[in-house]
Amino acid sequence: MTKDISNLDYIEKKVLDFIKSESLISQGDSIILSVSGGSDSIALSEILYNLSSILNLNLYIVYIDHHVRSNTYIEKEIIKDYATSRSIPYSFLDIYTTDFTEKTLREERYKALIKFSEKIKFNKIALGHTLDDQIETIIMSFFKGYGIEGLCGIPTKRDNFIRPIIILSKEEILEYCKRKNLKYVDDFTNLLPITLRNRIRYQLIPFLKENIPQFPQSIISQSVILSIENDLLEKLSKKYFDGLKRSNNVIEIENEGWKLLHDAIKIRVLKEIFKNFNEELSNEAIFYILREMSIMEGSKTLEIGNTEIYLYNQKIYIYKKEKHEFIIILPIPGEVKLPTGEILKAELIRNEGEPFNFKDLWHAYFDYDKIKAKELIVRNWKEGDRIEPFGLEGKSKKVQDVFVDKKIPKWKRKIIPLVTYKDKILWIPGVIRSDIAKVTNDTQTILHLSLKKEV
């Protein structure tokens, strides 16, 4: 049965049509309204309140207090009066932070909204961004060099966040509030030309409106087109990124396949990789990486912030520069979990003359009668380490030279465990064992060491 919408304000009808066309809201949704007390968020609340009977919505107002401004008590009073008069439940949430940048405050606000929505089991969060916010964001993204993603502007929906009034201009919002006799309090700092956004809002945009007849519709239409193109690039990049090999926080790329990729895909893949390492790439860094990776030959390392890009044997390894120092006690018998997630095990077995596969580098066998230790020390490789390789009868060799001979990539050398006994290296799993305590016919008890992935 179609519900009557004849009594709706024309702005409410406009938003309802937008909600349907963008599939922002489903029948019966439970929606948190993020309300600051300003005209935009109060209008958002009123519009969804008047649509709630049509869409069968459950609404809950949440106000976030960052403890930055002094007039929050006024905002809270307005919200309290508004919510109470319409029987909408509400809550005031406090956020304390030492970083008062716009980006940090926004991130903390969103985290608080998500946490609260999970607590009360509401499935969506409505934000009061408007068409003016959209235009300002696109212009700022252009000047800051945020690429196609930035020029797409603010998304209509992302995860549980929706922006139902992003098609309404500030002028429409203010007229709506006036018609509905809605009380609000706008932040006076939004009127001051003290931030880039405010200067764009009060100086640049009026100039563009006056001198470019197609503005602002032209910029909105362009952002829609770019969003469509961005969606395609995002899907192609994600498909490639998801297919990359990962091991122990290292991402591996086949160099030949990488060279065949279009730069547009490479840029997005690099951004996603560095995002996984909690790093953001500047445009300059992206161009530098693309240029260097295109001419990398043999063995070469690039350092970008706390991340390294290492080319070896026609493979590209990208990993976070971290200290991999560890010292772990391996009881005999017993097992330990290594920082890599692998399980190192020690067990004692009687020598009953059965043959062992000494070529399997993930297992090593020693004469326990010659060791007689209750535990071994497992640690990472250090410069200057030496090992007496099996078969060389007392002659030692630098572990670094062993790694080079075995073609072990530099990044991997830092996480390979070394099993030691009395400061001597017994075994490097998967690489080499020492000549110490070889099993003979006279051996009665065998120490069996093995390394395996955690199941």
Image (cartoon, rainbow, N blue to C red):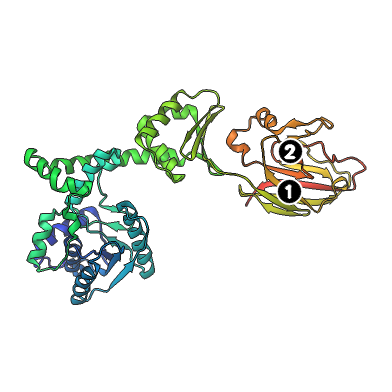
Q: Which mark is residue 377?
A: 1
Q: Amino acid at mark 1?
A: Ile
**Exactly how many numbered labels are in the figure?**
2
Q: Quadrant of the N terminus?
A: bottom left
Q: Does any portion of residue 31 appear in the rendered image? A: no
Name the residue carrying label 2: 360
In contact (CB < 8 Å): disc 2 and disc 1: no
Q: Cα distance, mark 2 to mark 1?
A: 22 Å
Q: Amino acid at mark 2?
A: Asp
Give residue 129's position: percent from left, percent from top: 22, 55
Give residue 3's position: percent from left, percent from top: 15, 67
Which quadrant would residue 442 be assigned to in this image?
A: top right
Residue 400 lies left or right of residue 442; in this view the side is: left
In terms of depth relative to the viewer, which is nearer, 239 or 133? 133
Q: Secondary structure at mark 2?
A: loop
Q: Secondary structure at mark 1?
A: strand
| Label 2 Cα crowd, 10 Å radius (few <14 / some 14-19 / many 20+) | few
Give residue 67's position: percent from left, percent from top: 31, 64
Residue 209 lies left or right of residue 26; in this view the side is: left
Which quadrant would residue 292 be assigned to in this image?
A: top left
